Image (cartoon, rainbow, N blue to C red):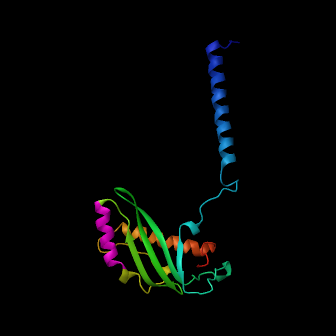
C-alpha cells in the first residue's frame, strides 16, 4: 500500500478546512435569514401614503372587505429602469369605489432623456386613467413614452398590494 506524501496530506487538510468554513458560513447565513427572525421590514405603509380620505371616520379596511379600496387620495413613488438607470415618478390617485376620479403625476427624473419622456407621459396619460377601475388598469405606451408607464404601473401595484394587506391604510389626521 502506498503512503500519502506530506503535500497530499496538506491538500486534504486544506480541502477539509475550506469545506468546513463554507458550512459555517451557510449556518450563520441561515441563522440571520429574515425568514426565521422577527426582522423589521418596511411595510407598504411606508411606501403608500393615504393623504386624504373621503370617509370622515377614517375607516381602516379589513380582510373581509376583499376587493374594496378605501375612498381617498393615495400618493406613491413608482419605479422603473431606464437605459440610464433607475428612475421614479410620483403618482397621486383619488379613488372612489375603486374608480380613479383624479390623477396627478410628478416627474422625478434627473437624466435629460427621462425628463423628456416623463414630461410626455405627464401631458398625455390622464384620458387613459380617469374613470377607470384601478384593478383593470395597466398602461403600456403613452404618446411614445414606453418606460414611464412602467413606473406608473408600479405605483398602481403598490396601491393594490397595500389594499390586499389591509395594514397600510392609516386613519387620517
Residue 145 visible in the current orientation: no
| Segment tinted magenta in the rendering | 112-125
Residue 101 visible in the current orientation: yes
Q: Is residue 95 left or right of residue 30?
A: left
Q: Is residue 127 left or right of residue 22?
A: left
Residue 124 lies in quadrant: bottom left
Residue 146 belongs to the span the image colors magenta? no
Image location of residue 11, percent across then percent down: 62, 21
Residue 17 lies in quadrant: top right
Residue 81 lies in quadrant: bottom left
Depth order, front residue of 170/120: 170
Image location of residue 70, percent across then percent down: 57, 82
Depth order, front residue of 52/169: 52
**Which residue is found at the position 61% from the left and 83% from the top?**
58
**Which residue is found at the position 38% from the left and 65% from the top?**
108
Residue 76 vertical placement versus 6 (above, below): below
Depth order, front residue of 109/52: 52
**Which residue is found at the position 48% from the left and 74% from the top?**
75
Query: Main SS type for the magenta part?
Result: helix
Depth order, front residue of 142/19: 142
Q: Quadrant of the C terminus?
A: bottom right
Total labels: the figure holds: 0
Image location of residue 16, percent across then percent down: 66, 27
Image location of residue 162, percent across then percent down: 57, 72
Q: Quadrant of the N terminus?
A: top right
Q: Is residue 35 left or right of residue 70?
A: right
Amino acid at each position: 500500500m502506498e503512503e500519502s506524501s506530506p503535500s497530499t496530506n496538506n491538500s486534504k487538510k486544506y480541502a477539509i478546512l475550506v469545506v468546513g468554513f463554507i458550512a459555517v458560513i451557510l449556518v450563520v447565513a441561515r441563522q440571520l435569514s429574515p425568514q426565521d427572525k422577527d426582522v423589521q421590514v418596511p411595510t407598504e405603509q411606508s411606501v403608500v401614503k393615504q393623504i386624504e380620505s373621503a370617509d370622515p371616520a377614517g375607516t381602516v379596511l379589513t380582510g373581509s372587505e376583499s376587493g374594496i379600496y378605501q375612498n381617498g387620495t393615495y400618493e406613491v413613488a413608482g419605479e422603473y429602469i431606464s437605459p440610464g438607470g433607475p428612475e421614479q415618478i410620483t403618482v397621486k390617485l383619488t379613488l372612489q369605489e375603486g374608480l380613479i376620479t383624479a390623477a396627478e403625476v410628478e416627474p422625478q427624473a434627473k437624466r435629460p432623456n427621462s425628463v423628456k419622456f416623463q414630461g410626455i407621459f405627464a401631458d398625455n396619460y390622464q384620458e387613459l386613467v380617469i374613470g377607470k377601475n384601478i384593478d383593470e388598469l395597466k398602461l403600456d405606451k403613452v404618446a411614445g413614452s414606453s418606460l414611464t408607464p412602467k413606473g406608473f404601473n408600479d405605483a398602481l401595484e403598490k396601491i393594490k398590494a397595500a389594499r390586499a394587506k389591509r395594514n397600510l391604510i392609516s386613519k387620517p389626521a
